[in-house]
Image: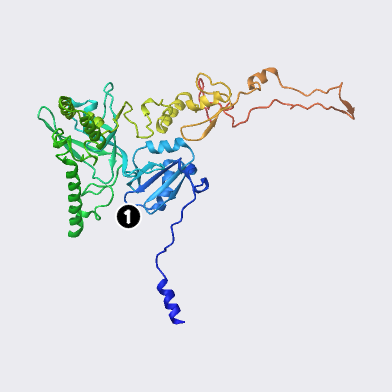
Amino acid sequence: MTSHLDKALLQLSLEEDDEPFLLPDHPEYYSTGRNVLSVVGRLLNPKCQSMADLILDMPRKWRLYDRVKGVALSKDKFQFIFKHEQDLIDVLNKGAHTHNMWPIALERWVEKLPEDYLQYISVWVQMRNIPINHYTKKALESLGDFAGKVEVVAFDPDKSQVRDYVRVLVRFDVSKPLRRAKKVTTPGGETVNILYDYERLQKRCYTCQRITHEQPQCPIFKNLKASTEILEGSSAESKRNEDFAHLKKSDPLFGLIPEHQLGLDPITGRPKIAEEVLEDTRLYLKAASGAEKGAREERIRKSIEDLEKDPIAQKISLRLETPPTVTKDLDRGKGIVFDFSACPDAIQRQEKLLAGAISAGNRVLQSGKVVTEKPISMEQSDSNQGGSPASLTGYSAGSSVPSASGTLLKKAKGRKRPGTFTRRANGKGVLRPDTGRGKIVGEGVVTDAKRKAQEDVEPSQSSARFKKPLVVPSEGPSNI
């Protein structure tokens, strides 16, 4: 029994020896339809960025809420699926995105991922201290290449420029440090220091200027072993650069292309001359012989000399890069910008409380009555609501307005009853029996009509109209 168990244990293996599982090539096994409207991103500093917070916070920052949902693919990769194409385009056009003040790499989903996928971010850069004699499109494109591959230049020479910088949209490699400045020598011999500021990039390592870690985790502050690994990595990169910087003697292009035109571009990390261009040039030389070959060699040498004077032409012809576009929208990529100068002043200034109280007091002293002005906004609202039209003085019948002290004062309605002196002139009214409608009961007359008072109604002793002066003008003071 023991021998059989030992044989079974010996036959066991920690790794599976069977063939890998092959997924069926059916539509039910693909999520391409959902991924078409999605973006894939990567956390550049996972130690300071939480994946769960990112999935919940980014829809709120984009103001999309229920129109986008996030999916955590790994510890540092994620995906956001949109409901509408326009929302996805708007998010990508906003430029660099950050979470917890550290940037994230974000690109649209593609079925076949390129080698540099999620390795670059698009960020707007502000360039300052540009020489006054070099405010041209080509000069700005050349200066912007030191911050990254320029895609858009926001420059309009026909308009006034109120800012002390020019904005360029660059494609920045997240593995490289942010450039703060670059010394440039003009053709006249003047040396200027071009300054670069990156929009929306809030945090970085202040030692190596990279956006992938904080300063305590910077390799410079690590032990000697970590610094040695960095030196080994730089030596490997320099060795790789040397491979591109030299041509073999058996190469048809040997001696035709200067050595400073070979190697890797320190900005983009790519060859200064694309391999496709070199291969086409070799075929161009191999197809000729004799005097024709010499003529072709001279043409190649002359073309390279002409391209050395134009950095933009080098980018297009030698590196096969797409040329940057120029836009006249100087605030492109900044989001919603509200121009307060173009907005009419809809809020009218109201009179101050103290000034209103003083003016109301002056009117009381002059006329003996409390008069308050009606605010302009209330007059307009009354007229819009179909109320009685306001008079020339700003008052309307039956309206109550706030006074300077805050209390509501109602305007008295006009009396329909005749005045006291008019009623006295008409005589006292006496009730007369209605012999036509009433009936005699005993000695009196009973009628259905309302009886009137036997005497005229005098005004109240406390009314303002009844008050009489206590001093007769022509008889001197009274003895009361």
Q: Percent position (x, y) of residue 384?
A: 55, 24
Q: Quadrant of residue 281?
A: top left
Determine whether 319 is above or below 106 in the image.
above
Q: Percent position (x, y) of residue 350?
A: 43, 29
Seen at 35% across and 52% down, the residue is: 49
Q: Percent position (x, y) of residue 127?
A: 23, 34
Seen at 55% across and 23% down, the residue is: 383
Q: Quarter holding the C terminus?
A: top right
SS at badge 1: loop
382 left or right, relative to 426: left
Residue 408 in sight in this render: yes
Q: Quadrant of residue 193?
A: top left
Q: How is the image coloured?
A: rainbow
Assess disc 1: are there few (<14), some (14-19) or many (≥20) residues with their C-alpha within 10 Å of its C-alpha. few
Q: Percent position (x, y) of residue 175?
A: 26, 46
Determine whether 337 is above or below 437 in the image.
below
Name the one closer to the observer, 236 or 292: 292
- Residue at mark 1: 47
Name the one closer to the observer, 449 or 96: 96
Residue type at mark 1: give it.
Lys
